[in-house]
Structure formats: C-alpha cells, structure tokens
Image (cartoon, grey):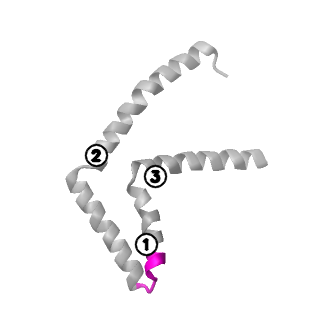
C-alpha cells in the first residue's frame, strides 16, 4: 500500500493529466465532421430498428442507449459502472 507521500504524488499527476486527457478526447469527439458521422450512424441505427419491426418507443429507447456510446459522459459512466460491478463481484467471492 502506498504511503501518504506516494499517494500525494499520484494524485498530483492525476489531477493535472486527467483533465488534459478528457479535453483532448472531447475535442476529437466533437469535431464537426465527427458530429455529422455520428448523427448519420444514430439515424441509421434507429431506421434499422424500425425496419426490423420495433415500435417507436422501443426503437427510441434502444437508440438512446446506443447514443451513450458516443457521449464522453456515457463512456466514463460505463467505465465506473464496470469498476463497481467488478468490485461487487469480488465482494461476493
């Protein structure tokens, strides 16, 4: 287990590097050409669900879930959910 000084160093690096990383990812994700591609992908996904026979509500709900794949917040949330699930699984053992 790290001592207090090592932990302080790690937190200092994390507090400066994580915001830079998130900004870089965000900049790449939300470029206009990427946004256009993302919109087309989402529209295609919804259309395929409808063409497969889903009703509006089902297609809308699945499309919302699909859209979280394109959201930085959604991605981060999945990472933390995965970590929590792993922690809960470990606690069950």
Question: Quick one: label 3 or label 2, which is nearer the N terminus?
Answer: 2
Q: Residues within 10 Å of mark 2 (few under 14, many from 20)?
A: few
Give the percent coordinates (x, y) of residue 56.
43, 79
Q: Residue at x 44, y 76 (%)?
A: 59
* Residue that sits furthest to the left in the current view: 33
Q: Nearer the viewer, residue 60 or 78?
A: 60
Give the percent coordinates (x, y) of residue 55.
46, 83
Q: Is residue 32 left or right of residue 84?
A: left
Residue holding disc 1: 60
What is the quadrant of the N terminus in the image?
top right
SS of the residue at dot 1?
helix
Question: Quick one: label 3 or label 1, which is nearer the N terminus?
Answer: 1
Give the percent coordinates (x, y) of residue 2.
63, 20
Q: Nearer the viewer, mark 2 or mark 1?
A: 1
**53 above or below 14?**
below
Residue holding disc 3: 74
Give the percent coordinates (x, y) of residue 68.
43, 57
CA–CA distance between discs 2 and 1?
26 Å
**42 above or below 72?**
below
Residue holding disc 2: 28
SS of the residue at dot 2?
helix
CA–CA distance between discs 3 and 2?
16 Å
Q: Is residue 9 magenta?
A: no
Residue numbers of the magenta segment: 52-60
């Amino acid at each position: 287990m790290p001592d207090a000084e090592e932990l302080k160093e790690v937190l200092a690096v994390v507090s400066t590097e994580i915001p830079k990383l998130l900004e870089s990812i965000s900049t790449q994700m939300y470029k206009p050409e990427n946004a256009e591609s993302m919109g087309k992908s989402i529209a295609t996904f919804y259309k395929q669900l409808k063409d497969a026979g889903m009703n509006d509500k089902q297609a809308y709900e699945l499309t919302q879930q699909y859209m979280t794949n394109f959201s930085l917040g959604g991605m981060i949330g999945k990472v933390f959910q995965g970590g929590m699930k792993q922690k809960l699984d470990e606690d069950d053992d």
